[in-house]
């Protein structure tokens, strides 16, 4: 008999390691993780880890032959800045990798006689407002508004949201006997900030990069304007959102894709918060026109009323708590030798 597992792809990334740690704390040990990199040493003996590419079909088929997949947290992705330099690779990983996994989830759902739960993190990058005046007119966007991404990453994420909805509601809709569908659920995240991992190529990473540079007593030139405003969220809230959506009764869900957010602030305000804890930090603003244009197309904030109503979403870390209780003390400990 195949062993029943929760599959976590992109397991060695920022969200993946935090998610696995939280699952383990909840007493869930049947975790199969997949990434092109090994897990951190602290997790290696606690889960079943496979090093490999999400696009390796033979690898995925071997996994399916050995395990019964109950839930999938599909976190593997090529992030926004890197995706702009390698759009074909981004499409392969972000779209083809997701499509292959959705097909496997569908086959597993059919074989099991009940849906595989498929949790997919999406991004504020799926939004694309045309100019700053429009951005000012629509400060808090809903899920269906301004879905015109300007980046490969945002385009990939939006399309994968649509693929997930298709597999959960319409796949094989012309079949005489329609099989069990995938239970696809997606969370659209704002910019995520982690105290325990170094920023790794996200276009919203100028915020955490300020903190990490200040803690190391390094100067930092922010790549967006001082007045640039987008939404953010501390990593513990991101993990909480994924787990709360996964646990929600399907009958409570009015949609398959939900906005979630915590607080919104400008790059200048972010700098002010960094200076409260690191008063000697040297932070300047030297906008990169290409990255600035991308962030300017994102909304100032995201309307997450549906998530709050349907499955009780509520961030635990507001702006003050994020900095004073989570980010600053943990980042200080990371770089205390400096």
Image (spheres, rainbow, N blue to C red):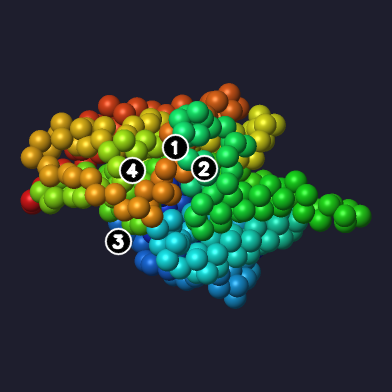
Q: Nearer the viewer, mark 3 or mark 4?
A: 4
Numbered disc in front, either 1 or 4: 1
Image coordinates of residue 71 in percent, x first then y, are 58, 50
In this view, 49 is above or below 205: below
CA separation in Å, label 3 and label 1: 45 Å
Which comes sooner in the sequence, label 3 or label 4? 3
Q: Residue shown at 67%/53% (left/top)? A: 163
Crowd tier of the residue under label 4, counting other residues whose Cα lies within 10 Å: few below 14, some 14–19, many 20 or above: many
Q: Answer with left or right where residue 81 lies relative to residue 70.
A: left
Q: Which residue is mark 3?
A: 41
Tell me: 41 left or right of 144: left
Front residue of 108 and 53: 53
Residue 72 located left or right of residue 205: right
Tell me the distance, in whole angstroms, between the alpha carbons under discs 1 and 4: 24 Å
First reached walking from the N terminus: tag 2 or tag 3: 3
**Which is in the foreground here, disc 2 or disc 4?**
2
Could you give the CA–CA distance between mark 2 and mark 3, rounded to whole angstroms?
45 Å
N-terminal-most mark, 3 or 1: 3
Q: CA distance from mark 2 to mark 4?
A: 26 Å
Q: Are marks 2 and 1 in contact (CB under 8 Å)?
A: no
Q: Which residue is mark 4?
A: 193
Tell me the crowding category of disc 3: few under 14, some 14 to 19, or many 20 or more residues within 10 angstroms, Cα based.
few
Residue 63 shows in this picture: no
Identify the element where label 1 is drawn. helix
Residue at x-position 55% and y-position 73%: 56
The reply to whether residue 172 is visible in this rendering is: yes
The earlier-in-sequence mark between 2 and 4 is 2
Instruction: State which mark lies toward you, 2 or 3.
Output: 2
Foreground pick, 223 / 90: 223
* Mark 3–mark 4 distance (CA, rounded to whole Å): 22 Å
Residue at 64% of width from left, 40% of height from top?
A: 256
Return the residue at label 1: 132
């Amino acid at each position: 008999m195949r062993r029943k597992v929760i599959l976590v792809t992109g397991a060695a990334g920022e969200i993946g390691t935090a998610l696995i740690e939280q699952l383990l704390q909840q007493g869930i040990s049947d975790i199969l993780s997949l990434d092109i990199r090994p897990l951190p040493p602290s997790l290696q003996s606690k889960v079943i880890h496979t090093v490999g590419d999400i696009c390796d079909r033979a690898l995925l088929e071997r996994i399916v032959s050995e395990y019964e997949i109950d839930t999938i947290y599909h976190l593997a992705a090529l992030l926004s800045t890197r995706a702009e330099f390698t759009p074909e690779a981004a499409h392969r990983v972000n779209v083809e990798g997701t499509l292959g996994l959705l097909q496997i989830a569908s086959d597993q759902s059919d074989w099991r006689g009940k849906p595989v739960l498929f949790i997919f993190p999406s991004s504020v990058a799926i939004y694309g407002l045309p100019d700053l005046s429009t951005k000012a007119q629509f400060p808090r966007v809903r899920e269906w508004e301004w879905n015109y991404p300007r980046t490969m990453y945002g385009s990939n994420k939006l399309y994968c949201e649509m693929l997930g909805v298709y597999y959960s509601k319409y796949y094989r809709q012309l079949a005489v006997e329609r099989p069990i569908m995938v239970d696809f659920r997606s969370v659209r995240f704002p910019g995520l900030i982690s105290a325990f991992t170094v920023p790794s190529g996200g276009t919203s990473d100028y915020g955490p990069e300020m903190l990490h540079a200040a803690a190391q007593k390094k100067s930092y030139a922010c790549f967006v304007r001082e007045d640039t405003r987008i939404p953010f969220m501390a990593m513990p809230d991101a993990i909480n959102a994924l787990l709360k959506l996964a646990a929600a009764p399907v009958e409570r869900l009015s949609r398959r894709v939900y906005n979630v957010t915590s607080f919104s602030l400008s790059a200048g305000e972010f700098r002010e918060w960094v200076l409260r804890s690191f008063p000697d930090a040297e932070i300047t603003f030297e906008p990169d026109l290409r990255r600035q244009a991308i962030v300017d197309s994102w909304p100032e904030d995201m309307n997450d009323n549906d998530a709050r109503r349907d499955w009780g979403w509520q961030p635990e870390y507001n702006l003050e708590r994020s900095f004073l209780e989570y980010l600053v003390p943990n980042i200080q400990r990371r770089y205390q030798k400096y």
